[in-house]
Image (tube, grey):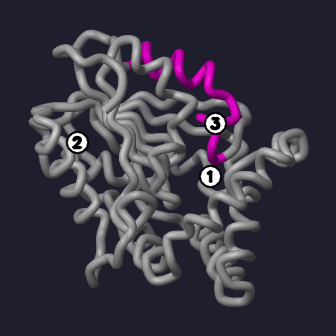
């Protein structure tokens, strides 16, 4: 746990498919001034590496979040999730509404659409044809805008090396992709009682921003916030405006 050590509100941050809590590094300093900040590596990734159980689902990931909050003695938390992590946040809000304050979903969806499925088919083809190296090398194309990739070539190379060294394993990756593609909250979203900020970048090549638009329409207490550019990982590419909007949302009166 980072940030405040007193009785301040807790914010738990859930990463996307990569599962690494370090994805949220650009948000930690901004949040730490006013909140207790919880980062974690998803089960089967990073510091929590190990084989995943059969039939692994977003529901399992949601219960992992509750276990983390219980272990920390946090009765309630705001949840911030990116892509797959956003699905996890929504599922926690559905299953355990009393444990959730506010929810922020970044470039998420209620049900993966045909374009997102095509992207995952392509990524899995790279894995099958070229192994982890090919998969990891292709990953930045789906995360970042082309101009940003060009301007940050050395950083991207370092991320690739780190991603390959800490690759979650083909079996775990397939299980996690299967879980996110199987998830469908289109019929249950109306049961999310907590306020939700649905944030998306219009130039995301993996998840169309229209998926976030549909999510915001379906959630009873949602607000849609669109940015023109920044790609799938716009929290990394454009952290300053995202952090400002995040803090405004979390500080809004109930």
Q: Earlier in the sequence, mark 3 or mark 1?
A: 1
The numbered mark, 2 or 3, whose residue comes first in the sequence reads: 2
Q: In which quarter of the image is the N terminus?
A: top left
The reply to whether residue 158 is visible in this rendering is yes
Could you tell which of marks 2 and 1 lies nearer the N-terminus? 2
The residue at which mark 1 appears reads as 208
Q: In the rendered image of this protein, does residue 232 appear above or below residue 246?
A: below
Q: Distance between the residues labelled 3 and 1?
A: 18 Å
Q: How far apart are marks 2 and 1 (CA)?
A: 22 Å
Considering the image in quadrants, where does the C terminus appear? Answer: top left
Q: Is residue 142 magenta?
A: no
Residue nearer the viewer, 101 or 192: 101
Question: What residue is disc 3 on?
Answer: 236
Can residue 217 be seen here? The reply is: no
Is 194 left, or right, of 86 in this rendering? left
Question: Is the residue under label 1 in contact with that under label 3 (CB below 8 Å)?
Answer: no
Query: Residue 209: horizontal and vertical position, in percent?
Result: 60, 45
In the image, is residue 246 part of the stretch drawn in magenta? yes
Give, as a single range, the part of the protein colored magenta: 232-249
> Which residue occupies 41% across, 30% down?
197
Secondary structure of the residue carrying tag 3 is helix
How crowded pointer 3 is (Cα within 10 Å; few <14, some 14-19, many 20+) is rated as some
Numbered disc 2: secondary structure: loop
Residue at 40 percent of width and 12 percent of height: 33
Q: Do the residues labelled 2 and 3 touch (CB within 8 Å)?
A: no
Decide: few, some or many residues near mark 1? Use Cα within 10 Å; few <14, some 14-19, many ≥20. many
């Amino acid at each position: 746990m980072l940030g405040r050590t007193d009785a301040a509100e807790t914010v738990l941050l859930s990463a996307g498919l990569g599962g690494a809590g370090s994805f949220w590094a650009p948000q930690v300093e901004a949040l730490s001034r006013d909140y207790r900040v919880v980062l974690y590596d998803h089960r089967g990734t990073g510091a929590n590496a190990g084989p995943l159980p059969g039939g692994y689902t977003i529901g399992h990931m949601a219960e992992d979040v509750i276990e983390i909050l219980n272990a920390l003695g946090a009765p309630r938390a705001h949840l911030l999730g990116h892509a797959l992590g956003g699905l996890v946040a929504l599922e926690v809000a559905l299953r355990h509404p009393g444990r959730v304050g506010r929810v922020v979903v970044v470039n998420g969806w209620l049900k993966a659409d045909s374009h997102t499925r095509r992207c995952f088919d392509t990524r899995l083809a790279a894995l099958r044809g070229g192994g982890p190296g090919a998969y990891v090398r292709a990953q930045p194309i789906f995360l970042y805008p082309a101009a940003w990739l060009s301007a940050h070539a050395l950083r991207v190379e370092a991320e690739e090396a780190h991603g390959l060294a800490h690759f979650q394993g083909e079996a775990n990756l397939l299980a996690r992709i299967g879980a996110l593609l199987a998830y469908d909250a289109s019929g249950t979203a109306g049961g999310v009682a907590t306020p939700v900020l649905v944030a998306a970048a219009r130039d995301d090549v993996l998840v169309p921003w229209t998926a976030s638009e549909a999510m915001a329409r379906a959630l009873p207490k949602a607000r849609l916030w669109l940015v023109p550019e920044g790609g799938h990982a716009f929290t990394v590419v454009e952290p300053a405006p995202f952090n400002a909007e995040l803090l405004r949302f979390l500080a809004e009166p109930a």
